[in-house]
Image (cartoon, rainbow, N blue to C red):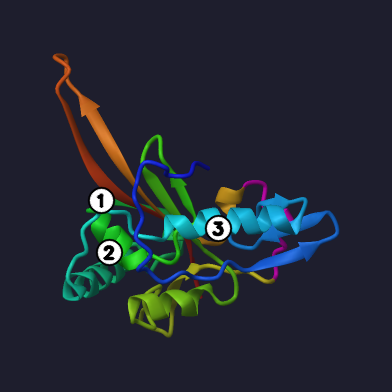
């Protein structure tokens, strides 16, 4: 991870506490599961993460109504991936153009990663309380599930108590919602460059 030392931060944004657990071999962040040998190391990491959630000078603030509407748009877009047939279950990804200020307006306080080199952010939501956390964020209790006839429903899997984390071969296979914002750039044959911000969502769905 890289600390953004080029931005001037203004401390006007809410900060979400980062949960952690104490292990015999060290201290683990429950969000990204990084393990640190000392509590001091974990606390230093937490201070870095907190800086990612402070709006930097120059990133403009959108009206609250625009943020509210974008949250509703996100719920609709996520719902488009919640299909009825079981063959559509499994990993889902969504990518679309998005302003950095829109991303920050919605997910400030939940940003857990920032890379200065490619100007990308990441948020991770998983665990037994993740669904209700996102329901509060989106102001919609059904943000991650869709109901069908015969009492069937498709939902986003954020926690599975029956499968230990050790059984997952890769972190990308964990039941979680990952939200990433980054800048994509292109350059033509004459060196003219264009760029745009994109929002990327990744999650797993399941039917019952």
Q: Is residue 173 above or below residue 68?
A: above
The location of residue 39, given as percent across then percent down, is: 74, 59
Taking depth in this image into account, of 125 and 23 the one nearest to the observer is 23
Which residue, as the protein is rendered here, is positioned at the far right? 24
Residue position marked by numbered label 1 in the rendering: 96
Is residue 52 something one can see in this rendering?
yes
The location of residue 206, given as percent across then percent down, is: 50, 67
Residue position marked by numbered label 3 in the rendering: 47
Q: Is label 3 in contact with label 2 (beta carbons under 8 Å)? A: no
Mark 2 or mark 1: name the one nearer the start of the chain.
2
Residue at 40%, 50% in the rendered image? 121
Say left or right for 178 vs 96.
Answer: right
Taking depth in this image into account, of 77 and 41 the one nearest to the observer is 41
Q: Is label 2 in contact with label 1 (beta carbons under 8 Å)? A: yes
Which residue, as the protein is rendered here, is positioned at the far top? 190
Q: Is residue 203 above or below residue 194?
A: below
Residue at 79%, 55% in the rendered image? 26
Disc 3 versus disc 2: nearer the observer? 3
The location of residue 96, given as percent across then percent down, is: 25, 51
Q: Quadrant of residue 134?
A: bottom left
Rate crowding at label 2 as few (under 14), some (14 to 19) or many (20 or more) other CA atoms within 10 Å.
Answer: some
Say left or right for 100 vs 201.
Answer: left
Residue at 30%, 59% in the rendered image? 103
Residue position marked by numbered label 2 in the rendering: 77
Rate crowding at label 3 as few (under 14), some (14 to 19) or many (20 or more) other CA atoms within 10 Å.
Answer: few
Disc 3 versus disc 1: nearer the observer? 3
């Amino acid at each position: 991870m890289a600390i953004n030392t080029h931005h001037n931060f203004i401390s006007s944004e809410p900060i979400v506490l980062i949960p952690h657990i104490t292990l015999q071999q060290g201290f683990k962040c429950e969000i990204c599961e990084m393990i640190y040998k000392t509590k001091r190391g974990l606390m230093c990491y937490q201070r870095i993460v907190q800086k990612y959630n402070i709006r930097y000078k120059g990133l403009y603030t959108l009206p609250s109504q625009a943020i509210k509407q974008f949250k509703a748009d996100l719920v609709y877009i996520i719902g488009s991936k919640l299909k009825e047939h079981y063959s559509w279950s499994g990993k889902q990804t969504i990518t679309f153009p998005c302003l950095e200020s829109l991303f920050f307006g919605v997910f400030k306080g939940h940003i857990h990663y920032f890379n200065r080199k490619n100007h990308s952010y990441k948020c991770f939501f998983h665990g037994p309380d993740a669904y209700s956390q996102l329901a509060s964020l989106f102001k919609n209790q059904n943000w991650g599930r869709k109901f069908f006839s015969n009492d069937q429903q498709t939902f986003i899997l954020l926690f599975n108590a029956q499968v230990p984390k050790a059984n997952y071969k890769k972190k990308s296979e964990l039941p979680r919602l990952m939200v990433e914002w980054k800048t994509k750039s292109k350059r033509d044959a004459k060196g003219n460059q264009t760029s745009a911000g994109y929002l990327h969502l990744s999650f797993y769905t399941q039917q019952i």
